[in-house]
């Protein structure tokens, strides 16, 4: 009897493991959110003219954006790799590559389009563009990881649309979308999935 | 070969075989090394179980070359999918006879 239960559990977890990337860590969401909030605060100071490195606001913002992007991604990969190690799962599997491909297309397109907007001087729409494309990337990636990420994706899309209407509040909505939502999502994910395995492993 | 009382299929009477079937029914096809990594088993062990499942015609082997490298990939047959589903149904029934 117990063996049958074990067998079914094993079948389910094996199916899931071979089709979904389950090493995405909640902590990485929280830390990436904090990085985004710091970035948004610095951007606020730059835009108000209280902080400057290169002397040109646009260059300062672009450099800041690049730093925030790289830091947030590195943090995400680092904590996910750590989770993979802890749970004894492989980080680089065919599913991982598929996930990167699924999320990569909207992300790269959105990133390039945001740069095009900046290049042409449409600053008011960049936050909306980033939020919308990021949301689409998350919904797209949802098939290959925890379903919950789709909810986060939809929230980002809604915020992005709002940012498109409320021009002038881009930075605030960007901070909510990339900062606050990531932190909330990270905490929820940590409680739901990671805390259990942490306890099990001592 | 089904056990008449439990409905469980003898073909799937091992953890590794359950694992192989589980990863193959949810993926179009997988190569040897990917299955090995997913199930965390040794080469010899996996190969012998794959061979047995192939002999029962629940999975098929496809050998091809990717560039110059030989590549062996596995996928389930329609028959294999059906038998595995029946096996899962039987397991569920044993746990919860009323459902």
Image (tube, rainbow, N blue to C red):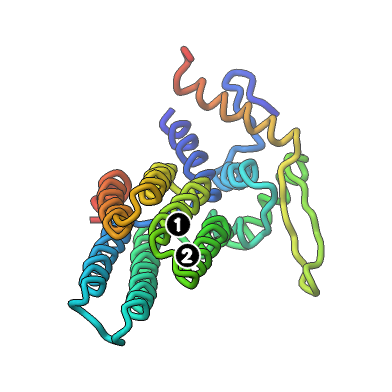
The quarter of the displayed image where residue B78 is located: top right
Identify the residue at horizontal 41%, vertical 31% (top origin): A2
Query: How many discs appear?
Result: 2
In percent of width and height, residue A125 lies at 42, 58
First along the sequence among labels 1 and 2? 2
Q: Are marks 1 and 2 in contact (CB under 8 Å)?
A: yes
Decide which of B68, A157 is in the foreground and name it: A157
The chain under label 2 reads A
Judged from the image, the secondary structure of the residue bearing numbered disc 2 is helix
How many other residues sit within 10 Å of disc 1, few (<14), some (14-19) or many (≥20)? many
Residue reaching furthest to the left: A50
Residue drawn at x 44%, y 27% is A1
- In the image, is residue A116 above or below residue B24? below
Rendered location of residue A195, percent (x, y): 25, 50
According to the picture, the residue beneath numbered tag 1 turns out to be A129
Residue placed furthest toward the front: A121
The answer to whether marks 1 and 2 sit on the same chain is yes
What SS does tag 1 mark?
Answer: helix
Instruction: Report the side of A6 relative to B55 (left or right).
Output: left
Residue drawn 32% across the image and 83% down it: A56
Q: Which mark is residue A114?
A: 2
Q: Position of residue A104 (x, y in %)?
A: 54, 61
Residue A109 picture quarter = bottom right
Residue B41 in view in this figure? no
Front residue of A116 and A189: A116
Position of A124 compared to A19: left or right?
left
Quarter of the picture containing the C terminus of chain A is: bottom left
Residue A23, placed above or below residue A70: above
Q: Residue furthest bottom?
A: A54
Q: Can residue A70 be seen by looking at this rendering?
A: yes
């Amino acid at each position: 009897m117990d063996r049958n239960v074990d067998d079914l559990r094993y079948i389910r977890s094996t199916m899931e493991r071979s089709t979904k990337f389950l090493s995405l860590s909640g902590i990485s969401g929280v830390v990436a959110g904090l990085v985004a909030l710091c970035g948004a605060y610095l951007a606020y100071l730059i835009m108000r003219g209280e902080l400057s490195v290169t002397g040109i606001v646009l260059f300062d913002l672009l450099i800041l954006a690049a730093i925030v992007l790289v830091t947030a991604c590195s943090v995400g990969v680092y904590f996910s790799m750590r989770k993979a190690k802890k749970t004894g799962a492989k980080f680089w599997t065919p599913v991982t590559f598929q996930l990167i491909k699924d999320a990569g297309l909207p992300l790269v397109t959105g990133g390039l389009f945001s740069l095009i907007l900046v290049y042409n001087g449409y600053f008011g729409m960049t936050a909306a563009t980033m939020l919308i494309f990021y949301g689409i990337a998350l919904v797209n990636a949802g098939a290959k990881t925890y379903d919950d990420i789709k909810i986060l994706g939809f929230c980002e899309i809604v915020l992005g649309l709002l940012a498109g209407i409320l021009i002038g509040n881009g930075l605030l909505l960007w901070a909510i979308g990339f900062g606050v939502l990531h932190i909330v999502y990270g905490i929820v994910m940590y409680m739901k999935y990671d805390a259990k395995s942490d306890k099990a492993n001592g | 070969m089904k056990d008449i009382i439990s409905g469980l299929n003898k073909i799937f009477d091992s953890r590794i075989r359950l694992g192989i079937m589980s990863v193959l029914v949810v993926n179009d096809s997988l190569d040897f090394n990917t299955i090995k990594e997913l199930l965390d088993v040794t080469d010899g062990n996996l190969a012998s179980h794959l061979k047995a499942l192939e002999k029962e015609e629940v999975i098929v082997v496809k050998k091809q070359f990717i560039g110059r490298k030989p590549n062996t990939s596995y996928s389930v047959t329609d028959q294999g999918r059906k038998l595995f589903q029946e096996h899962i149904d039987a397991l569920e029934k044993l746990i919860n006879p009323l459902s």
